[in-house]
Image (cartoon, helix red, strand yellow):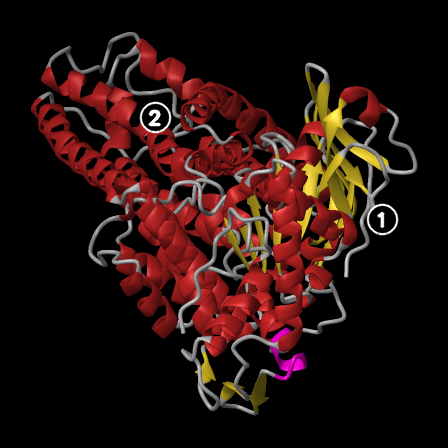
Amino acid sequence: MIFRIDRRTGTSVYVQLVQQVRQAIRMGRLAPGDRLPTAREVSERTGINPNTVLKAYRELEVAGLVEPRQGSGTFVRRDLAPLPDHTEALRRELADWVTRALAAGLDISDMQALIVEAAAGTAPTLEDAHHVD
Amino acid sequence: MNWLALRLLRPYLIVAAVLSAASTAFVLLGARAIGRQVDAHGMVVDDYAPDRTGLCETGLSCLPAGTATDLGQAIVLIAAFVPLLIGLILGVPLFAREREESTDAFVLTQSIPPMRWLSTKLFWALSAGAVCTAAVAVSFRRAAAGYTLVLDDVGYTLLGEVHKYNVTFMVMQAVFITALAGVLGLAGGRTLRTLILSVLAWPVVLVVAQIGGLLLAMVAFLLSSWSDSLSSMLGTLDGDETATFAALALAVCTVVAVLIGRRTVAGSARRRP
Amino acid sequence: MSTDRTVPALDVAGVSHSFGRRRALYDCSFTVPVGGVTALIGRNGAGKSTLLRAASGLLRPDGGEVRVLGEPVGDRSLPRIGYVAQQAPLYPMLTVAQTLALGRRLNPRWDAGYAQHLTDDAALPSTARVGTLAPGHRSRLALVMALAKRPELLLLDEPLASLDPVARTEVIGTLMADVAERGTTVLLSSHVVADIDGVCDHVVVLAEGRACLVGEVEPVLAGHLVAVGAGFEISTLDGAEVIEVRTAGRDAIALVRSAGPVPAGDLAWHRPTLEELLLGYLRAAGPELKREVSAA
């Protein structure tokens, strides 16, 4: 597993790590029983603070996706369904919203700006923003 | 720390040793050449005694000007200036160069206490200064000093007023100049400035040594009043004894310089942005 | 590790220092937690180097106290810290191998295997004299010297300044691996904010010789907002602590310290990036500014 960190997006590094592990599990690149790279390996390769890596792994552990095993590392625990049901509902609502936005004359970048603002305004903590996915 | 101190001192040690060896050789060979001239003129030269007012009174028993007198003058100059030069060579770069190149920030953040850094470096520099000067001083006193009395030279006479051709004094002079230049470099941190200050300090050092020596002798005389033999001895000092007290004054000055160096290190870099 | 995690790795308490008339530090206080990577951010002359020199024992401040791992700075703290000064000074006449040998002589905790490994990684020629090395190579060697000393607290003054982009990522990787493996605390100074994003978990912003922002990166970011909009509206922001406002014509952008909900109005609100946040503090810093965000 190789992490790719983009420091230019507003997304914090540890959220990016969490998202990339979720994505890898969802896409089948990580299967149950696979070992995640150690914090040291990730830090050495990407220059990310190991405390950030550990924080991301803890978050994944709380979500039940991975489990630490004493002395041997962090392992993937279960698969992620490709698209959970509640995500599907959100997507339908968003599709409606996009239709209305287009009708109102907004283009994609307008919509992105609105979404970012809304996310910043209604979900002030990044943790909250993250839990929506 | 010894390895580092000696490794850093190495180029200066080599220069000082070469200077010392060359001066010693010149003094010995020059003395032999003068000796032949003296013998040729049928003069009898005794062992050197500084306060003997010279064989060379009113040009009577002086050597005629020539190679021998030129050699004699050169030898006198060597004896007067080599201790200063050795002190400057070993003392000026000792700390000034480390400060200038900021390597003190490297060495002082290893696991070595700053005091050990200071004392190890000073120890080797002072010891080297003493040994290098001692070679010149001993060879001068044993082989050449006697002949200076058969030289008719105003410069020598003047120099003789402040400079003592005494082994202890010459060695202590090199030791103190080394310590002084080292401490000036430690505080100032610039090699050139340290060099200039040290050279300017030299005449002051000689005067201080004279006065300090006299004061010490006086104190010793007063303290020894309980013993008649001691006080009579201290009351009438010959030239070498005066020189020894002057050397003692320089030793005291060296200790003071080292203590100032320790204080500088303890409150180190206060003056540096 | 024998390090006690309840004692801060570095405790700077009311430290003041002047060089002649120039005041470098003035009543500067903050702590650096054990096991973290703390970035010391400030403009040139903000007092970063003075602070690091005080922590390394090279400088005794005029006032206040610096404690390293619970002890006052002194001979006893020397083996526990690794320090690399700004120009990465080393003895130019020694070879790389001699410099490493010197490290072994001068440091009881010296790890020769690790030193060799790091030197090989950095492709430093062991027979080359330090004086002939490129500045980037020299600073990598200086970093090797500091790391192989096996310190508990690493104090690095602009460690990335002379490095090329590849060396920069390698050095950060090495540092972070050391943090991961041994729990080393790192305090590094920088004025390039982009360099430390993702690297540090704590920040200390120095301005005018004092710490004007101290805290853990994530909570600090979450506690600030950037507002963009018409100038007159930003000027009416109340209830929020405005750190810095920049105007361009009728529009303005403001960095606001506020953890609460966003005020209603026509202003657009964003979470600041670390760079926006730090630049805001650096630009705003005046002599009177003193804001504390509680550190974790």
Picture quadrant where residue C11 is located: bottom right
- The spot of residue A68 in percent (x, y) is 57, 87
Picture quadrant where residue B261 is located: top right
User: Which residue occupies the foreground of this view, B203 or B143?
Assistant: B203
Q: Tell me the amino acid under the disc marked 1.
A: Pro
Rendered-image quadrant of the C terminus of chain B: top right
Rendered-image quadrant of the N terminus of chain B: bottom left
Q: Does the image show residue C173?
A: yes
- The spot of residue B255 in percent (x, y) is 58, 43
Task: Determine whether the residue tagged by mark 1 lies in a helix, strand or loop.
Answer: loop
Q: Does the image show residue B233?
A: no
C77 displayed left or right of C179: right
Q: Residue at x 27, y 60 (%)?
A: C97
Q: Chain of mark 1?
A: C
Q: Nearer the viewer, mark 2 or mark 1?
A: 1
Q: Tell me the amino acid under the disc marked 2.
A: Ala
User: Which residue occupies the foreground of this view, C51 or C172?
Assistant: C172
User: Which residue occupies the foreground of this view, C255 or C153?
Assistant: C255
Give the number of callouts.
2
Q: Chain of mark 2?
A: B
Q: CA distance from mark 2 to mark 1?
A: 85 Å
Look at mark 1 in the image and give the residue it sits on: C261
Q: Residue at x 40, y 69 (%)?
A: A2
Q: Over which residues does the magenta segment extend?
A: A59-64
- The residue sitting at the top extreme is B58
Q: Residue at x 25, y 58 (%)?
A: C123
Task: Determine whether the residue tagged by mark 2 lies in a helix, strand or loop.
Answer: helix
B97 versus A22 height, above or below: above
Q: Residue at x 86, y 40 (%)?
A: C263
Look at mark 2 in the image and give the residue it sits on: B80
